[in-house]
Image (cartoon, rainbow, N blue to C red):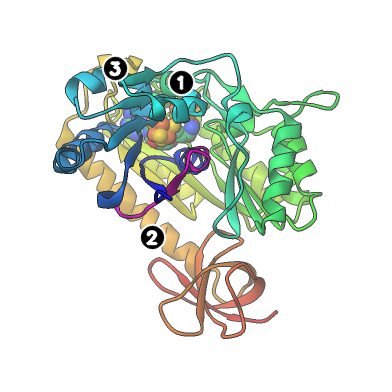
Amino acid sequence: MSSPKKLFIKTYGCQMNVYDSERMAEAMGNEGYLLTEVQEEADMVLLNTCHIREKASEKLYSDLGRLKPLKAAKPDLKIGVAGCVAQAEGAEILKRMPLVDLVVGPQSYHRLPEMARAPEKTVDTEFPVEDKFDLLPERKAPRGPSAFLTVQEGCDKFCAFCVVPYTRGAEVSRPVGRILDEARKLVERGVRDITLLGQNVNAYHGEGPGGAWTLARLIRALAEINGLARIRYTTSHPNDMDDDLVAAHGDLPALMPYLHLPVQSGSDRILKAMNRKHTAESYLRLVERIRAARPDILLSSDFIVGFPGETDRDFADTMDLIRAVGFGQAFSFKYSARPGTPAAEKDPVEAAIADARLQELQALITTQQRAAQLAMVGREVGVLYDKPGRLPGQLVGKSDHLHAVFVEDAQGKVGDLVRVRIVASSSNSLAAERIG
Ligand code: SAH
Ligand code: SF4
Ligand code: F3S
C-alpha cells in the first residue's frame, strides 16, 4: 500500500481563514491527504493568504520564494495559493511565481480537490452561484473544545480603506438549518464553545423557518442546543447591532460577555471619509446600551491610525473615544493603502507621524487592557480548558471574558468547563484557583 500523501497548510489573516483552512484540510482528507506540520515532507503546500494590509500580502511572496529549493528537490510538489491574495491577484500570482500550481479564491474551495488532481496549472477566482459550504464535505474531527463556524461571508459596506468587499464578495448568509446542523454535529464531537464568524456577522440574515432570521434569533436558537455552553460572534459592525442582539447579551447566559466591535476612529470627519456611516457619538451611545444589557461585558475594537487626511485633532478625538469607552483590548494598525480601494487615491499621512500615533494609541490600549485584567482579580468566572500549561498539573483556558487563565488543577482535563476565582494578573494572562 502506498503511504498517504501529506498536506501542509499555512494560514494567514483572520479567523475565517482558520475556519476555511480546516474545511479545505477535510476536503483534501477525502482525497487521501493527511495534514502535516512539517513543510519539507509535504506533497502539497497550501498558503491560505490575507490581503488586508500590504505587509500581509507581501508575506505570500517571501514565503513562496522560500519554497523554491523544496520545489526544486521535489518536482511533484503541488503548491497552491488560496485566500484573499488569490482572489485579488488571481493569475498574476502564476506569472510572478511560476512555481505555483493552483490559485483558488475563497468562494471556490469546493473545487480544490479537482484542481489538486489536475496535471496542468489552474486558477479559480469565480464567485459561483452555488454555496461552497453545501459542496464541501462535512466536518468530522474538531481538535479541541472550541470551534469556529462561519455563518456569513462577504461585505457590502465598502469602508474606503478595505479590500474585503472585493476579496470576499457580496454579503451572503448561510441558511439557519445548515448552521444549526453544523453546530449540533460539532457539539456531538465534544465542542462546547462556538464562535460564529462573518466579516459583518451581525448583518446576518439567513433563511430560516418563517423567513429571514437575524443574528439574535440565530443565537437564541443555538443557545437551546444541549451541551453548547458558550457562544461568541465576530466581527460586528456598529450599525448592525439591533435591539434584540443587544438584549440577547442580557438574556442569554451562553452568550459570553466579550464583544469585538470595531470603531476604527473617534473623529467624525475621518469616520465620514472612511465611509463608516456611524459617528463617535453613536458608537458611545451603542456602548451604553450594550453595557446596560450586560454590565460586565468586555469590549474590544480595531483602530486605524494615519488614514489619509487624519490631523492631530482627529487623532486626539480617537484617543478621547478610547478613554471614554475603556476597552478590554484592541487591535490597532497603521493605515495601509490597498490597490483598488477609494482611500488609496488620497495623499497619505507622513509615515513618522502615523508611527508616533500608533505607539501612543497602543500605549493607552495596553494601560486599559492591564486595568481590565486587574479588575478581574477576586472575581469568579468560567474557564474552558483548552490546553495543558507549562507546569505539571497546570491547565490553560479562556475565561468568559476571553482572558487566558492559568489554573493549578491536577484533576482537570482539556475540555472541562470549570468555575474559578481569579487570584492574580500578569501582563498577558490571569492566574486562578478552581472553585467548582
Ligand atoms: N469586518 C471587520 C474587520 C475587517 S479587517 C470590520 O468591519 O471591522 C480587520 C481590521 O483590519 C479592520 O477592522 C481594520 O481596522 C483593519 N484594516 C482594514 N483595512 C486596512 C487598511 N487598508 N490599513 C490598515 N488597517 C486596515
Ligand atoms: Fe471591511 Fe469591515 Fe468595512 Fe466591510 S465593514 S468594508 S469588512 S472594514
Ligand atoms: Fe485578510 Fe481576507 Fe480575512 S483580507 S483579514 S484573510 S477576509
Q: Residue furthest right?
A: 210
In this rendered view, identify the residue nearer to me: 8 or 377. Answer: 8
Inspect the image, locate mark 2, and give the three-letter code of the amino acid beneath it: Thr
* Coordinates of residue 359 in the picture (x, y in percent): 26, 49
Mark 1 vs ligand 2: CB under 8 Å?
A: yes
Inspect the image, locate mark 1, and give the three-letter code of the amino acid beneath it: Pro
Mark number for residue 367? 2
The magenta region covers: 27-38
Q: Say which label, 3 or 2, has the lower sequence index.
A: 3
Tell me, yes or no, whether the highlighted magenta stretch contains residue 30.
yes
The quadrant of the picture occupied by the C terminus is bottom right
Where, by quadrant of the figure, is residue 213 drawn?
top right
Ligand 3 placement by image quarter = top left
Left or right? Give the position of 15 relative to 181: left
* Coordinates of residue 192 in the picture (x, y in percent): 67, 58
Mark number for residue 165? 1
> Which residue is identified by label 3?
91
